[in-house]
Amino acid sequence: MKRFFALFLITFLLTLAGCGERQVDVQTEEPELPLAAEEPKEPKYLPETSPAREQQEAEEQAEQEDEAAREERREETLRALLEGMTLEEKVGQLFFVRCPESAAADKIEQYHLGGVLLFSRDYQDSMGGWLTAQQFTSKLESYQVTAAYDTGIPLFIGSDEEGGTVTRASRNPNLFPSRSKSPQELYAAGGLGAILNDAAQKNDLLFKYGINVNFAPVCDVSTSPNDFIYARSYGKNASETAEYVESVVSVMNDEHVAAVLKHFPGYGDNKDTHTGISVDERPLEWFQRSDLLPFLSGIRAGAPFVLVSHNIVRCMDDTLPASLSPAVHQLLREMGFTGVALTDDLAMEAVSAYAKDGNIAVLALQAGNDMVVTTDFEKQIPRVIAAVRDGTLDESLIDAACLRVLRTKMQMGLLKG
């Protein structure tokens, strides 16, 4: 019996030992462990009712409310500024004039000007030599100091720097390493990327010298070398031109230089309006599927200015040039533009005949322009003031235009909110 029990005990222990070995064999495979270094990631799309989604929406709403409150405060600041201005100061803000050849600072103060537009002579000294960078920058600073002492409202200081045939600043070798090339030349050398690199470098320099508005880009759709505007245009179809305009405006915004979209509603194959009237017979459908697209693209990209041409566009207004047409300006506003509409130079022959009494600036403001581009500001500003005082121009129209000018200056960082 003892031998039987001893035999049973030995057999049982051997069986246990065998089971233990099999268990060890099974556990020799190491289990996969989570990577301790990885942080848990938030889901890309949150459930509509999750606490995280609710918190995210609450933060977004708070941010929107903060921005709305800031915008309201800015508007209150602007309206208070407007209310404290004299009629003469408000009218002066509506003039973006060719910079006076002499006593410029005195005239900026006397007429309370809103902006000055520089031409080649403004980059030269009295003897015709090119100003150094320091001389040029100091001159523009003196204009801004004058405006600060006068109204406290900084100036728009503009220049035409399209590149190619229309350049001002880059002609001065003390300011630029070389004269700016046209968009078509740049595209041929390196595509759209070359244009955008040039726009960044060019507008960066303009800003450093004190220029805050560049009368560019040209938004006109032109694909024929026979067109007057072709050499200044992108030279491609409407959709490609729209892409070009959007991209250039975005670059200019980054460089803190305001873009001017020109020449609304589109030049097409019309002749030069510097020397006479140009009549555009194209139907509205043509503009809707072509010429208006680059302007719409630039507006959506945040361009604060649109320059209106002197062409008579029959499908919009069969009697008045676009720059003097309420219908054309209404179309521009219907496209969503809330910035500053300005005329092409009113000294051009194409519009001189439309104001037999000489009050061309009055007609321009009645049409819906916010700013008038002219050389003849010393005659035109008093006429606008007189038109307000005799009831020809409602002062509320002047106030609305001036408010858009002030708002744009605040958006550009010239005025503090």
Image: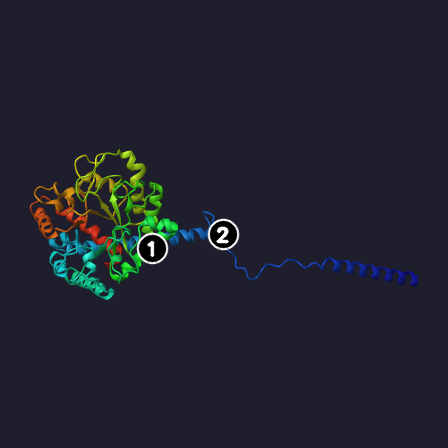
Kindly identify which residue carries mark 2: 43
Residue 219 in sight in this render: no
Vertical placement of residue 289 versus 231, above or below: above
Q: Residues within 10 Å of mark 2 (few under 14, many from 20)?
A: few
Q: Give the quarter of the figure containing the C terminus.
A: bottom left
Q: What is the three-letter code of the residue carrying label 2?
A: Pro
- Residues 357 and 401: in front is 357
Nearer to us in this view, 4 or 334: 334
Distance from label 1 to label 2 (Cα)? 41 Å
Position of residue 88 relative to residue 313, above or below, is below
Q: Residues within 10 Å of mark 1 (few under 14, many from 20)?
A: many
Kind of residue at badge 1: Asp
Question: Contact (CB < 8 A) between labels 1 and 2?
Answer: no
Residue 198 is labelled as 1
- Could you tell me if residue 65 is visible in this image? yes
Image-quadrant location for residue 266: top left
Screen quadrant of the N terminus: bottom right
User: Which one is nearer the viewer's eye here, 42 or 355?
Assistant: 355
Extreme-bottom residue of the structure: 134
The location of residue 279, given as percent across then percent down, is 20, 36
Q: Position of residue 16 (x, y in %)?
A: 80, 60
Q: Position of residue 363 (x, y in %)?
A: 13, 43
Q: Secondary structure at mark 1?
A: helix
- Say which label, 1 or 2, has the lower sequence index: 2
Mark nearer the viewer, 1 or 2: 1
The way the protein has been coloured in the rendering is rainbow
Q: Position of residue 254 (x, y in %)?
A: 33, 56
Secondary element type, mark 2: loop
Which numbered circle lies on residue 34? none
What residue lies at 29% left-to-right and 34% top-to-bottom? 285
Given residues 270 and 8, the one toward you in this image is 270
